[in-house]
Image (cartoon, grey):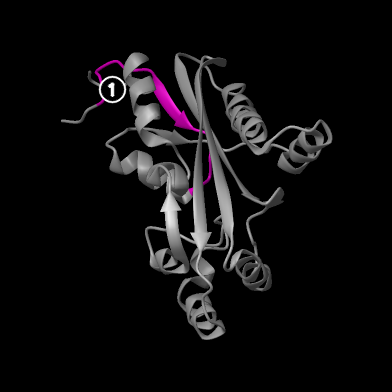
Amino acid sequence: MNLVRPGAPRLVLASGSAARRRLLAAAGLVFEVVVRPVDEEAIRTAMRAQGADAAATARLLAESKARAVAAGLAGETLVVGGDQILDCEGEWLEKPGDPAALRTQLLRLRGRAHRLVTAAVLLRNGAPVWETVAGARLVMRPFSDAFLERYLAVEGPRVLGCVGGYRLEGPGIQLFETVEGDPFAIQGLPLLPLLAALRREGVLVE
């Protein structure tokens, strides 16, 4: 027995994020993962040119990912899209991608505060029915070069796909002095508001 309502609409996660998959699975949801390409860089560039902030951009990216997936699906379907932007004093940092970029990014963030802006949207049969944006403020401690080398050796390969180059649910918590905000949103998905939306949409047992 699970917590999904009998006859509930098909639920699809429009994200390749392992963290988002893990959060939904741990919450007891039954879902599929479908990912379709979206030109994220073009969207970010256009939004910056328009003077949009990180919250508006993350929301648009989340919706664009969800729409790309929803367009190829048939039947009664709910699609979850998500996106996260790291804003360090107005500079939007990307996923590091390789060890050299990871080292550079962590040195850039060392001893400074940054914001994680996390957006999620829910489409029903291609139409938006819910959205939210959550913000978190994190301050990295002025860790030593020796700590950084050990951290990179322990966590490096695991965090190349993480926007901040860290996992708070792992050794990355040792990078920080303070963390303020929804821990689920920091991991990539504002989970509690999403679960409430899924209950309203008839996916989960009330």
The residue sitting at 77% across, 33% down in the picture is 47
Q: Measured along the vertical axis of the image, is residue 105 above or below residue 81?
A: below
* Image spot of residue 117 (x, y percent): 56, 41
Q: Quadrant of the N terminus?
A: top left
Outermost residue to the left? 1
Q: Is residue 82 left or right of residue 105?
A: left
> What residue lies at 78% left-to-right and 38% top-to-bottom?
48
Per the image, is 7 magenta? yes
Q: Residue furthest right?
A: 49
Q: Amino acid at mark 1?
A: Leu
Side of 7 relative to 18 (left or right): left
Q: Say whether residue 35 is magenta.
A: no
Give the secondary structure at mark 1. loop
Residue labelled with disc 1: 204
Residue 8 point in image, percent of width and height: 32, 17
Single out the residue that lies furthest toward the bottom: 146
Segment colored magenta: 4-17
Please tell me which residue lies in front, 75 or 64.
Answer: 64
Q: Quadrant of residue 112?
A: bottom right
User: In this orientation, which residue lies closer to the viewer: 98 or 113?
Assistant: 113
Q: Where does residue 3 sit, x and y in percent of width and height?
A: 22, 28
Residue density around tag 1, few if under 14, some if 14–19, many if 20 or more, within 10 Å: many
Could you tell me what secondary structure mostly forms the magenta stretch?
loop
